[in-house]
Amino acid sequence: MNTSLKAKHQRLILVVIALAALIGAALLAIWGLRSQASYFYVPSEILSARPDPDRGVRLGGMVETGSLRTEPDGVTIAFVVGDGKAQVPVRFRGIVPSLFTEGSGVVAEGRMQEDGTFVADNLLAKHDERYVPREMKDMTAAQAQQVVAETK
Amino acid sequence: MIAEFGLAALWLAAALAGLQLLAGSLALTSRGEQMGGIVRPVAIVQGLLALTAFASLIALFCRTDLSVRLVALNSHSLKPFIYKLAGTWGNHEGSMLLWVTVMGLAGGVVALVERRLPERTMLATLAGQAFVSLGFYAFLLFSSNPFERLNPAPPEGQGLNPLLQDMGLAFHPPTLYLGYVGLSVAFSFAIGALITREVGPAFARAMRPWVLGAWIFLTLGIAAGSYWAYYELGWGGWWFWDPVENASLMPWLAATALLHSASVLAARNALRAWTVMLGVVAFSMSMVGTFLVRSGILTSVHAFAVDPERGTFILALLAINIGGALALFGLRAASVTEGARFALVSREGALVFNNVMLSATLGIVLFGTLYPLMAEALGAKVSVGPPYFNPMTALFVVPMLLVMAVGPLLRWRRDAFARVRSALLVPAGLTLGVGIAVAVSAPIGVLPLLGLALAVGLAVASLLPLRGRSLRRTPLSTWGMVVAHLGVAVALFGMASESAFSIEKLVAARVGETTRVGSWEVTLAGVHPVAGPNWTALEADMRASYAGGAPASIHPQARSFWAPPQQTSESALLTRWNGQLYAVLGEAAEDGRWQLRLWWKPFVTLIWLGGLMVALGGLLALVGHVASDLRRHVARAKIAYRRQRQGR
């Protein structure tokens, strides 16, 4: 009788420890996600509600035609991302994805600097029609409408 | 003809799965016992029919039969043969057919060879396997028919995504699927044991080889996928915390926990309910992964097609299978009798700790993967990446690694730290020493520093279970544990070294110009056009020499495929014993310079070498367990035979 009680106790203790660890993990996860999840912005949003310079975010929009230039070091590019309402200058050091061109959509991952430039560590361009960054799929539809509206 | 033949085989297989479920369930009732005899043969034939359907699809792809919609959409007559073959599973329908084929075959093999469990538990297990299969057959036949015809047939196929045209495609998906779906056996075993209330050491011993087998393939599949992404995507990273990668990591974490808790159950008859629960969770994670990847809810190179109907279908399957299993668990868990007791400081105690830490890590990864979906449902677009995953998982992985060094040295039931303290002095001292030495000599992050120091200590500690033993008499399963744990240390060292000491150089170089990266001197000798079977490329000719040694040639390419039209960059790797040089060719600048991206990654290859060692450890344990089970079986048969003769 005594031993079975103890066995029950042991199981209870194990369950409590496991639950405590898992709940701890869940709480940590929520805290971590609140402080670290990177949010997606379009140019007009990023200008009106500027994220902290030390916070990683994504900026999505169209590469403005005529804005793309390569700096003298040969590996840094600068271009302007716009959404029809606002424009943000972006700098990127690296090899651009092959489908990255002026007039097409792009999602830049990086940080918004104090001076209003967005410094990207990574560019996601449309790879092929079956692999479009999720945020861009919605955006290109919206942009198509804007382009139509602007050219009217 | 082949398409119709394959479709017929698939329908028959589905019908047999239905029969298997029906006969298996009836046989469990008191009136239908005679139905039990057909369950095993039906399971075997079902597996063979699924294999026939899959072989038919392979044949269609090899012949590039463009009258079949799937082939027309995903293949091209000019594609090299190996990619025609591997292209069979490089798309949604084909990969789901591979899924049910593996599932059918796994059930068939269980039916053929598994004799250790009580027959009623076996029947319940096979019925459970059939139930899960049936859902996936329905998914294939009603919403993803791979054999659908296209009339009229187009003159040429649309081709395969060039990123997938690589040897990795031949190896990575089948291995990963063997792992994912192999876990369905553990799931069915858990269901069977819950239905018949036969949870005990015999159940754990019977389940363990299947879990080990699936886990070995999962390990290999993840390692292969990581290496593939590393060289194919040209970003120089080996793990991106992409939702699809997480989808493969989660079943691996659950299966790892399951392996360890099954060994407690097999050896000590403890952790009964927990082991059954993990059996359910492991395959549930495989299904969640499939849902994430195949439903089109995520967009990645793995999500072949976005089709909301399919997503709903998989979600329903998920809800039925996981919900049903958890409900059954809830009903029966209370009646699973108490296991044996153990002290906190004991082998069991260490394994419980490992299980809890693995589960917590799994929870962190699951939450981080699903959070963007939940946030999007609320209208916010969020992406979660390394700044969340790295520190959060480390919080649980680091304590687990510490206990992993101690656990194998502890005795079952009850032990004292004092007994193993002296043995652990060396690894603990090494960990501290390496940690301080590295911290003083190089400014690196906290996590890489921890990783390096722990890896060295863990490598030594993982060998300790062999001390004082005759190496020839050490059981194979103990060798398996030692090799796998050592593999974890080796992989950890590679990861930490890569993230701490990688050197990256991004330059625009003229032909003839030399770039230094670490101890390497890399000269761009020229850039030439080259052509392949279905692509053309610009190929850089580079001469790389390490610390003034003889130069070796490497040739990174920028490829343009024409079916479908797409560009990829083929990185070039130069492997030395102490790391890899990684080179990518970028675009040409207007003034005749070429963009080059070079990395020197010290000890990066240890990541995958460690992964292979982990899988090898699993294989050794598998062979060891199967061999000892066979020996036990033979010995028992002999005793029974002798008794029979004496009785006469």
Image (cartoon, grey):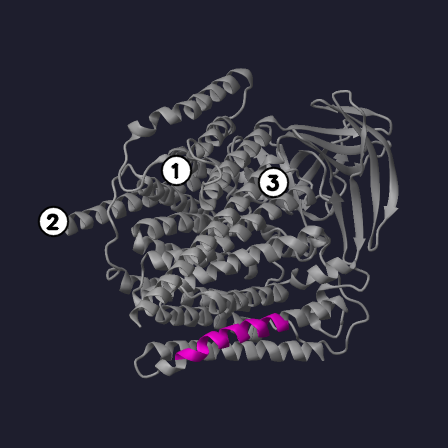
Residue B256: in magenta span: no
Which residue has dot 3 on it? B238
- Image position of B40 with respect to B492: above or below: below
Name the one closer to the observer, B434 or B45. B45
Please tell me in which quadrant of the rendered image residue B304 appears: bottom right
Q: Where is residue B44 in the image (x, y as percent from the top left)?
A: 52, 73
Q: Where is residue B585 in the image (x, y as percent from the top left)?
A: 77, 37
Instruction: Give the magenta-colored segment's residue range.
Output: B36-53
Please tell me in which quadrant of the rendered image residue B508 appears: top right
Please rate how many residues cluster around mark 2, counting C-alpha atoms within 10 Å: few if below 14, some from 14 to 19, many from 20: few
Give the mark nearer the N terminus: 3 vs 1.
3
Q: Distance between the residues labelled 3 and 1?
A: 30 Å
At a point 77% along the width and 66% down the height, the residue shown is: B157
The number of callouts visible is 3
Viewer-side label of 3, 1: 1
Q: Which chain carries label 1?
A: B
Residue B37: in magenta span: yes
Majority secondary structure of the magenta segment? helix
Q: Which chain carries label 3?
A: B
Residue A2: assigned label: 2
- Determine whether label 2 and label 3 are within 8 Å by CB: no
Q: How far apart are marks 2 and 3 (CA)?
A: 54 Å
Name the one closer to the observer, B578 or B389. B578
Q: Where is residue B67 in the image (x, y as percent from the top left)?
A: 75, 75
- Evaluate whether residue B593 shows in this view: yes
Specify whether B51 is left or right of B510: left
Specify whether B68 is left or right of B8: right
